Amino acid sequence: MVVKGVLIDFLAVGVVLCSVCWLIANIYLREKEENHTQGASGPTEDDVEWLYAFDVHCNSYVPVCLLLYYLQFLLLPLLNTTSIFSAILSNLLYLGAFIYYNYITFLGYNSEYLKVITGRN
């Protein structure tokens, strides 16, 4: 179970998610340069690095791990019943994890550090 959580949930899904976020950041979230040479397809100074995108994923994954692995394990006696309360509570845990992941990912791509390394103010 731990191996599945680390290899699949953290690494495999993380590589896919951070690659998608990295592509979106480099294609849609960059400022257009007026004096950029036409036809040059290499990386420019304001490209977001893939490792930075993976670091943002690692930071965003911490609350997901805390909510969906540790807190869910502690609440297992409540969640293991067949009541509407347990269904709502378990769905709220997943909703909270989803919101935290998206919010911290937003903060990572909107950080002052990213603005400094790409030269934006």
Image (tube, rainbow, N blue to C red):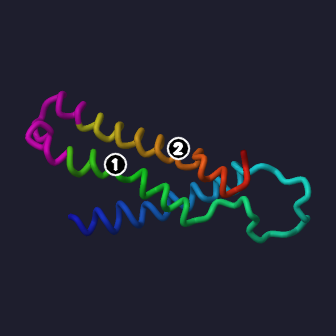
**Quadrant location of the C terminus?**
top right
Question: Is 87 placed left or right of 64 in the picture?
Answer: left
First along the sequence among labels 1 and 2: 1
| Residue depicted at x 28% and y 66% | 4
Residue 2 at x, y percent in the picture: 22, 65
Q: CA distance from mark 1 to mark 2?
A: 16 Å
**Residue 79 included in the magenta stretch of the image:** yes
* Mark identifier at residue 109: none
Q: Which residue is mark 2?
A: 107
**Residue 30 included in the magenta stretch of the image:** no
Depth check, mark 1 against mark 2: the one in front is 2
Q: Residue 100: which quarter of the image?
A: top left
Say which element carries label 2. helix
The answer to whether the residue labelled 1 contacts the one labelled 2, judged by CB atoms less than 8 Å apart, is no
Q: Amino acid at mark 1?
A: Val
Q: Amino acid at mark 2?
A: Leu
* Residue closer to the observer: 86 or 66: 66
Residue 69 at x, y percent in the picture: 23, 51
* Residue closer to the observer: 70 or 52: 52
| Residue depicted at x 88% and y 68% | 39
| Residue depicted at x 69% and y 61% | 47
Say which element carries label 1. helix
Residue 87 at x, y percent in the picture: 22, 34
Q: Which residues are magenta?
A: 72-89
Residue 77 at x, y percent in the picture: 8, 41
Question: Is 30 placed left or right of 107 in the picture?
Answer: right
Q: Which residue is mark 1?
A: 64
**Quadrant location of the N terminus?**
bottom left
